Image: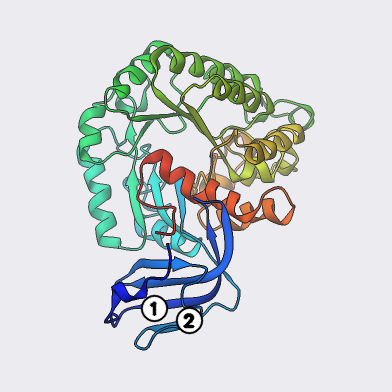
Amino acid sequence: MSGNIDKLAPPHAGSTAYINARIIDPTAGTEYRGAVLISDGKIADFGPNLFASGAPYGIQSVDCRGHHLAPGLVDTRVHTGEPGEEHKETLGSAGAAAAVGGITSLVLLPDNEPPFDDASLIEFVARRARQIKLVNMYAYGALTVGLEGRELAEMGLLAEAGAVAFTDADHAVGNAQVLRRALYYAKAFDALIVHLPQEPTLSGGNMTSGEMATRLGLSGNPPLAEVMMVERDIRLAEMTGGRLHLTKISTAESVSVIAAAKARGLRITCDTAAPYFALNDLAVGDYRTFGKLVPPLRAEKDRVAIVEGLKNGTIDAIVSDHRPQDHDSKRVPFAQAEPGGVGLETLLPISLELVHNGHLGLPRLFQLLSSAPASLFGLPAGKPA
């Protein structure tokens, strides 16, 4: 967009020009020095030549002094305690944490008490988001009733209520027939099915299988538990033609399988969470429960493969997988600890390590954090204007 300021004359009292900024445009994959005009709380114009000779009279000007401006982050995997476990977190505190972390849009997982398998729960989230007014909040609808993996939820009604996609959160659907039906049904209204690929009978261990698990005496969750489900889910998506998004990819072999499926033109997308490119299983160390996640932190070769998948486009997005726990859930023996941890405030700084270490440029990073997830979920976010 060029600097056509005349269309805004006379300037609104609430207009602000951010000049001398490094603008990151993830949709175009570019980074350049320029300016941004905000009018009535919205981006009205931006570009390299905007306000090249200074902002017009009547517009407040902010000199960014070469600092970066980028679209807000879009986090599509967030769990909060509201409703049901408000002692862990409320939607208000989650919104505040998201805003601090640069996240302006987030999608809430449905595994609350009660789960989001009823339209009234989707409407509740929308109502609370309007009250809080900190960030944009959207909600998943449950894929199955009670997240039990047996009976499909009323996806059509949930979509009408505002659900942006469907998932059973960290509950993998072990029954292939149920997931096949879900993909068929969702295809009728082009809905996105988001699935965590973890084979239920293999994935109950406390950390990834390997030398560290053996040394610590902890039960293992083999990488095969993920790869088997990735392969199964891709075949089901190919059979049905449905839109499938695989979430929290953590293994090298999964990255290879997904890359091959994409090369065949299948409607497959995927994401990973920040811990899987930042840490490996050594982070568990002496039973450090902050490192207990679902899926578990993997070996170093898997971490390296995740980074490569982010670089080459196999992995489409990065999520925080924000799942706060209280002290009682973490200050227990490792095997008894609840998985998960906070991620809204740390998503951007952890992800920036990919830039600092030379793996990604800023435009590509913000594609993964902003424009790509917004596009996948059909959200009005993730782009400069």
Query: Dot 2: few (<14), some (14–19), or many (≥20) neighbours within 10 Å?
Result: some
Query: Is 18 left, or right, of 308 in this rendering?
Result: left
* Image coordinates for residue 162, horizontal then vertical, percent: 25, 41
Can see residue 321? yes
* Image coordinates for residue 111, horizontal then vertical, percent: 38, 37
Instruction: Quickly name the residue at label 2.
Output: 62
Between 286 and 332, the one lying in front of the other is 286
Q: Residue furthest bottom?
A: 57
- Name the amino acid, label 1: Thr
- Name the amino acid, label 2: Val
Task: Identify the residue at image location x=44%, y=18%.
Answer: 237
Between 289 and 274, the one lying in front of the other is 274
Can see residue 77? no
* Label 2 – label 1 distance at C-alpha: 7 Å
The correct choice, above or below, for 131 with respect to 200 in the image is: below
* Image coordinates for residue 29, horizontal then vertical, percent: 56, 51
Query: Is 175 left, or right, of 116 in this rendering?
Result: right
Instruction: Quickly name the residue at label 1.
Output: 16
Task: Identify the residue at image location x=70%, y=34%.
Answer: 305
Q: Are marks 2 and 1 in contact (CB under 8 Å)?
A: yes
* Image coordinates for residue 150, horizontal then vertical, percent: 34, 17
Q: Secondary structure at mark 1?
A: strand
Quadrant position of residue 263: top right
Mark 2 or mark 1: whose residue is earlier in sequence: 1
